[in-house]
Image (tube, rainbow, N blue to C red):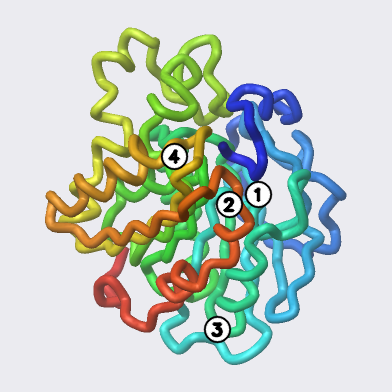
Amino acid sequence: MLFPNQTSAVGIWLVFLLPQFGSAEPVVSSAAAAPKYLTAADFTIEGMPQQQYNLNATFEQGVLQRIDFAGSVGYIIVPKGKVDERRRWVWVVPLWLAVPSHYGDVLARYYVEDLLAKGFHVVGFDVGATLGSPKGAELFARFHEHVIREYKLAPKARMLAVSNGGLITYGYGFRYPDRIDRICAIYPALDFRSWPKFELVVGPGAITPKGLAYELTPDEMKSRTSEFNPIDNLKPLADARVPLFHLHGDADELVPLEPNSGVAANRYRQFGGNLKLKILPGTGHGGTECFKNDDALEFLRDKSPALPDKQPL
C-alpha cells in the first residue's frame, strides 16, 4: 500500500533502516550537502528512517532547502517565481513522494511543479509510518509551528496525503483541525484495522518507528481503538469545515476503497462535512493516473481558503 506497485504490507519494512528521540534545535542547511540516502546518522528518533530517500532534488519551478528539526529531517521547496500573496503551502505526506526515493524520482512531481509555479511553497517532514499516533501528531504540530514562523507561511496547511500518509495526516488533522486548510488524499489508509491490520499497529509486530509509536498494549488498543483510529475521528475536521478530496481506485487490494475512502465519505457527509470522492475504475494501488490527476491538482491550488488564512494557531 504505502508504496507504488507494492503488494506486501509487511515486506516493505525489510528495506528500512532503523536507528533516538531528541530535541535538537532546528537547523537549515543546503540540500547539496545531503547524502545519497538519509541514514540513522541523520536522526535521533529511534526507528528512523524507515524509507530510503535523498534531498538532492532539483525542480524547474523551485529550490529545496533541507530542515533538520527535533531529531528528524524535512524540507521546504521555495518557489523560484512570484510567491503566492497569501503564502499558502502544501504539505506532502509522506515526504519522500516529493524527492528522489528508492521507489522513484519525485513521484508527485506533476503536482509539486505546478504548485510551485503558482507560488505555493511545498513542505515535507519525516515521522515514518506513525499510523496516526499521538507522538507523531505532536511532532507534526511542532514542525508546523516552526515552518510558519521561520518562513512566514500561512497558518493553515494544505495537505497532500498518499497511502499511509492518510493515517498520518488524519491523525494530525483530527487533533489539530484548525491548522488544516484542506486535505487531498490519494488512496489513503484511514482505518488501521484495514491497513496495516491491527497486529501491526501495536505490540511486538508494530511497524511504527519506536520513538513515535503508540504507548499501548494490544489489549489497551482494542478497548480504545475508536479514540485513536482516524476513521473514527472525522467529526473535528467536519466541524472545522475542512474540505476533503479523495482519489481512490476501485481495484485497490492493499488499501481497499470501501473501508477507507468509502466509509470516510459517508461519515464525513453525515457530520455535515464536504468530501468529494473520485473513484478510478480498474485502478489499483499506486496507479500512475493517481499522480497526474487534474481534479486533485485543482483542489490543492483552489484560490479559496477553507477558513480565513489569518487566524492564529
Label 1 crowd bin: few (<14), some (14–19), many (20+), radius 10 Å? many
Q: Which residue is denoted by mark 3 in the rendering?
A: 119
Q: Do the residues labelled 4 and 2 touch (CB within 8 Å)?
A: no
Q: Which residue is denoted by mark 2 in the rendering?
A: 125
| Marks 1/2: CA–CA distance | 6 Å
Label 4 crowd bin: few (<14), some (14–19), many (20+), radius 10 Å? many
Is residue 122 visible in the rendered image? The answer is: yes
Picture residue at 31% right of the left edge, 44% below the top:
262
Check disc 2 and report its element: helix, strand or loop: strand
Q: Which of marks 4 and 2 is in front?
A: 4
- Mark 2 or 3 closer to N-term? 3
| Marks 1/3: CA–CA distance | 23 Å
Q: Which residue is denoted by mark 4 in the rendering?
A: 189
Image x and y of residue 221, in percent: 33, 17
Amino acid at pointer 2: Phe
Picture residue at 54% right of the left edge, 84% below the top:
118
Q: Are marks 1 and 2 in contact (CB under 8 Å)?
A: yes
| Marks 4/1: CA–CA distance | 23 Å
Q: Nearer the viewer, mark 1 or mark 3?
A: 3
Q: Are marks 2 and 3 in contact (CB under 8 Å)?
A: no
Q: Which residue is denoted by mark 1 in the rendering?
A: 73
